[in-house]
Image (cartoon, rainbow, N blue to C red):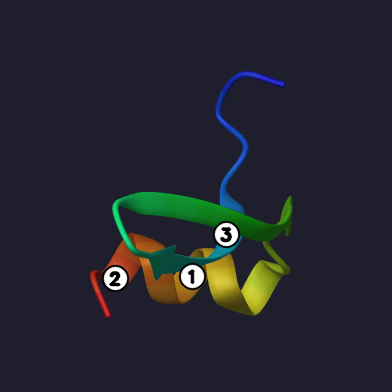
Amino acid sequence: AVGDVLVVVYCYRENTIRLISARRATPSERRSYEKGV
């Protein structure tokens, strides 16, 4: 949904970015993001 914060795990392989996982952020992760940590 619009406005959701996601936690994304990725890695670089050669010249490619590989997506490992993506999920909605927990409330504490969202607060950390909003504080700029």
Cα distance between the residues tagged 3 and 2? 18 Å
Q: Residue at x 55, y 28 (%)?
A: 3
Mark 2, Cα crowd under 10 Å, few <14 / some 14-19 / many 20+, is few
Q: Nearer the viewer, mark 3 or mark 2?
A: 3
Cα distance between the residues tagged 3 and 1? 16 Å
Going by the image, does 4 lie left or right of 21? left
Mark 3, Cα crowd under 10 Å, few <14 / some 14-19 / many 20+, is few
Percent x, y of residue 9: 58, 67
Q: Is residue 4 above or below residue 25?
A: above
Residues at marks 2 and 1 touching, judged by CB atoms closer than 8 Å: yes
Q: Amino acid at mark 1?
A: Arg
Q: Amino acid at mark 2?
A: Lys
Q: Amino acid at mark 3?
A: Val
Cα distance between the residues tagged 2 and 1? 6 Å
Mark 1, Cα crowd under 10 Å, few <14 / some 14-19 / many 20+, is few
Residue position marked by numbered label 1 in the rendering:
31
Q: Quadrant of residue 36?
A: bottom left
Q: Earlier in the sequence, mark 3 or mark 1?
A: 3
Residue position marked by numbered label 2 in the rendering:
35
| Front in this rendered view, residue 17 or 9 | 17
Secondary structure under tag 2 reads: helix
Going by the image, does 35 lie left or right of 29? left
Residue position marked by numbered label 3 in the rendering:
8
